[in-house]
């Protein structure tokens, strides 16, 4: 074949292929992308299948008080395909808009219907005349139309009053494509109360629609989902079964009647272990500090009776979406981090680690061993000092285990830890849940850091547990990190006689048909008495904690109560906060001493001594707990947000009339401009548990955890501004 014919054949082939490609592109556009549009133009009635979201289950406290419930919410949605169809029946020409789209790897100019002008003309204008229109985000409407067409209704108004809903319903036949409905809307009736436990919601997204659902439904409304707290971890239980509605519509998109309807089901009712009134008590107690966390645990079952963290947030702010300004206010100061649940976040624990060190010592048969305190223990060129040495160059001399716990003597525990070795230390700490997640039903729980453990060795290649690092582990410094919840769970077997129960915050979950989905029973993880620890060993540890509160020279004197005996251990951990040297202050405790029921742990950031700051707070919590046991009703009221602050608090004045303070509308928050001076019965550890010590490889105060980004409210834009903005009056 001659070259010129070959060239002609080649060009003809190219033209055929290009034409075939254009044909396929148009077929795809008409048969797939615009299928519903052309179907709507076919005269005659048609059936439409609508997917409705299930009704979310309620969350209550252990006494049935609702903490998360549903309200009736009146909404108006647009089926954009039906609005376009009705418009084309009324007008000869549709307004057009040009935009660039990417097809086959190239940007191409395309002309399409101007959905915003169509909606404004056919729907918004008549709504304006009835006084029912509202500004909206036109850009979001365009995107919604391009993405979903008629599959997903566009939510125009989710804030209709009952009166507006009624007026719109009376004229609904005048608005093809406009659907009125009643949807459940989440509400947290007590505001910020238990916000870190409950979590918050996020609207469903287009990625949540499966291919099967796209084929099954003409219109699809998805389920909101929890993305923090129990709303997240129990989301699959809380979601109710979907509803399916089949309606008959005419060629103009007007509803003729309903052919079939399966109503949405209600999700499971989730009952928490927390007591709402004790939760209120704990939260208002913590508001006397700037950044703090607390846990009240039932040592007999592992149930969390209260868990709080400040600063906090209002989960109602996320319903149905959160404004960008509000979200910025929450995230503008990362150190305050109101989304972080500090109760399950790890912090440097300080001298609270002397108690698990005592457990490790007991496993090695050293509970009755005495060690001497000469003021400090040298490790190479570095010394780990006793607080008494750092304060006055004093020393404790020979100490037994109970006396060492009472006096919080660093040298005693440094020597004990190295006498048993770092491997025995890791085994003892691991036995009581340190260095790993407790498994509580909350997202983002921090496992903490246990130096010497397998995970620590994996994260710090080449690191070796030297005698100095072993000593630092015994006093809760260096890389050591633990959460308030971990300490409460660790303390429970010491209080109850050896049984470590997995902490839990979900008591039970029951489906709408009465089926129990989550059963109410404690989960025993470890029994110390069958693991090599004797009852007499636990008795020595308990005695030391009792002495710390009730005998002169103890570090936890401000926890002491008149009518109830409490056992406690303080901690004042040296940390770095915002680039400055600081402290994490702790008190962990259990009570009553003879028949323990509660473990109470409180931690405060950027604070003075554990005894001086957290001691009065723990005392206040116990006063409320025992008052409720005596039949006095603790208050329960909606809580407003507590923003917290970053100013250091040296000490907190003991509360003279605790019950009166609890009964206040809201407890007084801390005043960062005035701090109490440390008194003589402080724990003595203030800022000086460690003298000339090795630098830590992990000096941070805590791990900040940010939950998934919520749905941000789309603000109105110029095209969607159908109601004139108010003009400020200038006098």
Image (cartoon, rainbow, N blue to C red):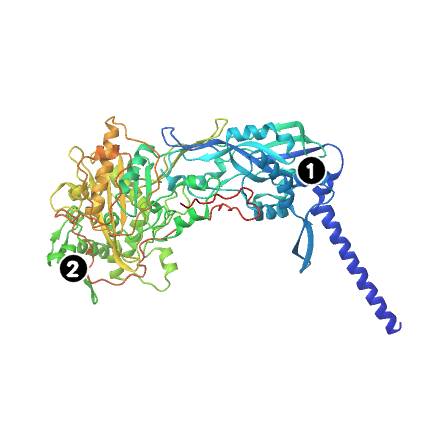
Q: Earlier in the sequence, mark 2 or mark 1?
A: 1
Q: In this view, which residue lies farthest toward the right?
A: 1
- What mark, if any, has residue 86 been given in the picture? 1
- Give x and y (percent) for residue 235: 48, 39
Whether residue 212 is visible to the viewer of this picture, yes or no, is: no
Asked whether, in this view, residue 592 is left or right of residue 458, the answer is left
Question: Is label 2 in a helix, a strand or a loop?
Answer: strand
Question: Is label 1 in a helix, a strand or a loop?
Answer: helix
Q: Bin the neighbour count of mark 2 within 10 Å (Cα to Cα): few under 14, some 14-19, many 20 and up.
A: many
- Give x and y (percent) for residue 58: 45, 32
The C terminus: image quadrant? top left
Residue under label 2:
376
2 and 1 marks in contact (CB < 8 Å): no
Mark 2–mark 1 distance (CA, rounded to whole Å): 86 Å
Asked whether, in this view, residue 654 is left or right of residue 32, the answer is left
The N terminus: image quadrant? bottom right
């Amino acid at each position: 074949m001659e070259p010129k014919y070959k060239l002609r054949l080649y060009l003809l082939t190219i033209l055929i292929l290009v034409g075939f490609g254009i044909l396929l592109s148009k077929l795809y556009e008409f048969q797939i992308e615009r299928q519903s549009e052309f179907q709507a133009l076919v005269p005659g009635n048609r059936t439409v299948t609508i997917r409705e979201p299930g009704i979310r289950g309620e969350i209550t406290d252990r006494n049935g008080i609702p903490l998360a419930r549903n309200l009736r919410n009146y909404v108006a949605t647009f089926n954009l395909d039906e609005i376009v169809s009705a418009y084309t029946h009324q007008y000869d020409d549709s307004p057009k808009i040009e935009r660039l789209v990417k097809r086959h790897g190239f940007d191409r100019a395309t002309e399409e219907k101007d959905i915003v002008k169509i909606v404004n003309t056919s729907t918004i204008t008549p709504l304006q005349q009835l006084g029912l229109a509202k500004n909206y985000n036109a850009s979001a409407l365009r995107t919604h139309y391009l993405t979903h067409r008629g599959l997903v209704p566009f939510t125009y108004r989710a804030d209709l009053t009952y009166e507006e809903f009624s007026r719109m319903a009376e004229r609904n036949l005048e608005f093809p494509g406009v659907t009125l409905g009643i949807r459940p809307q989440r509400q947290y009736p007590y505001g910020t109360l238990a916000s870190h436990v409950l979590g918050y919601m996020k609207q469903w997204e287009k990625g949540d629609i499966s291919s099967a659902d796209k084929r099954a439904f003409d219109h699809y409304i998805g389920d909101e989902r929890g993305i923090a707290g129990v709303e997240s971890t129990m989301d699959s239980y809380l979601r109710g079964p979907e509803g399916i509605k089949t309606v008959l519509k005419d060629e103009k998109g007007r509803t003729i009647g309903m052919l079939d309807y399966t109503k949405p089901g209600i999700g499971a009712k989730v009952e928490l272990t927390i007591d709402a009134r004790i939760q209120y008590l704990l939260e208002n107690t913590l508001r006397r500090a700037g950044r703090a966390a607390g846990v009240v645990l039932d040592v007999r079952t592992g149930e969390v009776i209260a868990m709080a963290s400040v600063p906090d947030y209002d989960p109602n702010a996320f319903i149905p979406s959160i404004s960008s300004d509000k979200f910025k206010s929450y995230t503008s100061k990362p150190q305050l981090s109101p989304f972080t649940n500090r109760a399950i976040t790890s912090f440097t624990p300080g001298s609270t680690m002397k108690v698990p060190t005592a457990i490790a010592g007991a496993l090695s048969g050293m509970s009755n061993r005495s060690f001497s305190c000469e003021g400090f223990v040298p490790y190479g060129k570095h010394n780990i000092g006793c607080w008494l040495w750092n304060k006055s160059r004093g020393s404790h001399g020979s100490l037994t285990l109970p006396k060492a716990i009472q006096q919080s003597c660093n040298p005693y525990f440094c020597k004990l830890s190295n006498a048993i070795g770092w491997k025995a230390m890791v085994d003892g700490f691991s036995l009581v849940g340190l260095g790993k997640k407790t498994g509580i039903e909350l997202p983002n729980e921090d496992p903490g850091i246990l130096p010497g453990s397998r995970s620590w060795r994996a994260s710090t290649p080449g690191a070796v547990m030297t005698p100095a690092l072993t000593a630092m582990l015994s006093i809760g410094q260096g890389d050591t990190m633990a959460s308030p919840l971990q300490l409460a769970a660790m303390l429970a077997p010491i209080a109850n006689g050896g049984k470590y129960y997995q902490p839990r915050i979900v008591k039970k979950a029951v489906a709408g048909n009465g089926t129990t989905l989550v059963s109410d029973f404690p989960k025993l993880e470890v029994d110390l008495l069958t693991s090599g620890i004797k009852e007499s060993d636990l008795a020595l540890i308990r005695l030391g904690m009792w002495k710390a509160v009730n005998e002169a020279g103890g570090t936890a004197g401000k926890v002491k109560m008149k009518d109830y005996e409490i056992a406690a251990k303080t901690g004042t951990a040296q940390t770095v906060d915002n680039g400055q040297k600081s402290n994490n202050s702790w008190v962990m405790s259990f009570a009553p001493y003879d028949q323990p029921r509660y473990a109470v742990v409180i931690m405060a950031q950027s604070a003075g001594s554990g005894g001086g700051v957290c001691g009065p707070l723990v005392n206040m919590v116990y006063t409320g707990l025992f008052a409720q046991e005596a039949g006095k009703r603790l208050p329960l009221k909606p809580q407003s947000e507590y923003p917290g602050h970053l100013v250091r608090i040296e000490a907190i004045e003991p509360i003279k009339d605790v019950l009166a303070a609890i009964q206040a509308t809201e407890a007084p928050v801390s005043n960062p401009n005035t701090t109490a001076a440390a008194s003589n019965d402080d724990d003595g550890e203030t800022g000086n548990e460690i003298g000339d010590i090795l630098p830590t490889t992990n000096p941070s105060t805590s791990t900040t955890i940010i939950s998934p980004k919520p749905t941000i409210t789309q603000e109105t834009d110029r095209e969607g501004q159908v109601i004139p903005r108010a003009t400020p009056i200038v006098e």
